[in-house]
Image (tube, rainbow, N blue to C red):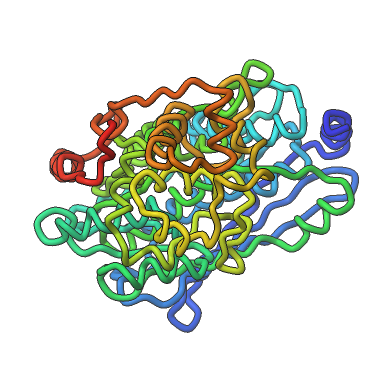
Amino acid sequence: MSQQRFDELRKEYSKFVYKSYEISEVDDSIVLLYRYSIIGKSDLSFTHVLTFEKSEHFEFSALDEKFQNLVFHIGIAELISYYKITCAPIIEIEAGFIEDVQCAWFSKLFFKGLGEFLFVNQIETTQEELFTISSVSSKSAYIPIKMDKTKGSLVPVGGGKDSSVTLDILESCIDEIAGKIIGMSINPTNAAMSVMQSSTISGEPIIIRRKLDRQIIELNEVGFLNGHVPFSSIVAFISIFTAAISNLRYVVLSNENSANEANVVFNELEVNHQYSKSFEFEADFRFYCSRFLVEGIEYFSLLRPLHELQIGAMFAHLHRYFKDFRSCNVGSKNNLWCNKCSKCLFTYIMIAPFLNEDDLANIFHADLLDDDELLGTFEQLVTPELVKPLECVGSYDEVNTAVGLIIEKRKNSLPSLLRWYSDKKEIIVNPNLLKEFLTPHALPKKFEIILKERIARLTKIPKNI
C-alpha cells in the first residue's frame, strides 16, 4: 500500500522548496525559523523553529553575518522531516546557494538516511529516481568561516550510557586536552538533564528546543507518508553552529563502531537505522564541514574505536549515573525503562556481564532475560539471518559474546531466554571485544592516547574472556 501511496503523492506533489530562514534574538535566546513548501494539488507550507535558550557559553551573536551559512545549512538538514511527507521528485533550495557538489553530498545523505523509511514502507526506488536537488537562489556562495582561537569541547548528550562514558573520559583530561566541557541537548529528557548534572561539565548545559510544524502529525493521520529520518545528521549541523557561537574547538560524539553495521538489505540498499551515526557519515560530514562550513572546529566520535562491550565495561564503573541514565526511547517521556523494547534488552545485555544482580535490579527493576515476551526480540539480536531491530543496538558478535559471558556468570540458575539460547545456539565468546582499538576513526591524537589508556585500565573483565 505504501508503494502505491508513494507513487500517488509524487504525482500530486511535484516539488519541495526550502524557502527561507530567519535569525532573531528574543529575551537573550536565539530563535532560528525555517520555512518550507510542497508544491502540488494543494500547496503545503511549514514553519520549523529552533530555540537556543539563553546560555553563558555563547561568546558571539548569532546575528553576526559570518554565522549565516551555518544557520542556512541547518535548514537543509532539517528539511528531510518535511520532504518525506510526499517524497516530491524535486527538491529546490531557494534560501541560499549551494554548488552541485554540495547538492550531490546532500543527495547521498538523504537517500541513505531514508533507507529505513523506504524499507518499512516497502518503497522501491533508487537515489536517482527519488529526487534531484538543485539550488535556485541568486545569492552568492558562502565562504567557510575561520575560527582560529577555539578551545573546549561540546558534547551532545542523549541521557544513555554512551554519552555518560564520553563525559567521564573527557572529565579525566579536562585541563590538558578537552578544555572546558559543555553539554548540549536537544529537547532534553529528564535522563539527559540528570546525566549532565551528575557530570562535571562546565556551567549549565546548552539547551535547544526543536519544534516541528504541527501539520506533520495531521498529515500523517490522513494518509501522508511517515517514517525514520537521519536525526543525528541534524544534530551534527546544529552542534557545529552551537560550537561556533560558543567558540569551542571540538564537537565530541558518542557513536561506537557497531553503528556502522546495517540492519537489513532492501532493494540493494544497506539499510542502517544508525546511518547518520556511522563512520561513513562522520567522515563525509568532516569533509563537508571543513570545505564548506567552518575551519577550526573538529567533529568526531570519541567512542568510534570501541565495541559496545567495552563501553558496557566502562559504564559499569560509573555508579553515579546508574540511577539517572536511560536508553529507552519508548519510556523516555516518562523517564522510565519500558523493559519491552529492543533498546532496553540490548542495554541490559551489554552491562549485565559487568554488574551484580542487585545493581541490575536497581536499574531495570526486572530481569529482562527472564521475560518470555522478549524472546522474539532476543532472537533478532542474536541471529544474523534475521532483521536486526530497527533501533540503536550493537552487532551480532557483541550481543552473542555478552550473552555467552552472562551464561557463564549465571550458569547455576539460567533465566528463560538464556535457557533458550543454550538449547538453540552455540556459545561463542570473542575475547577481542574487550581489548581491540578499532579503525577507522577520526580521533585527534591526544584523544586517541587517552582512550587507549582507558581501555588498558578496564578491570571488570570476566575471568573467562
> Is residue 291 visible in this depiction of the protein?
no
Rendered view: 378 above or below 57: above
Determine the residue located farthest toward the left in the rendered image.
Answer: 176
Q: Is residue 380 left or right of residue 282?
A: right
Of 422 and 317, the residue lying toward us: 422
Could you say which quadrant of the image residue 390 lies in? top right
Percent position (x, y) of residue 215? Answer: 78, 59
Percent position (x, y) of residue 271? Answer: 59, 28
Identified at 55% across, 45% down, the residue is 369
> Is residue 344 visible in this depiction of the protein?
yes
Identified at 16% across, 57% down, the residue is 172
Percent position (x, y) of residue 211? Answer: 62, 64
Q: Is residue 325 left or right of residue 44?
A: left
Of 116 and 57, the residue lying toward us: 116
Rendered view: 166 above or below 84: below
Rendered view: 292 above or below 123: below
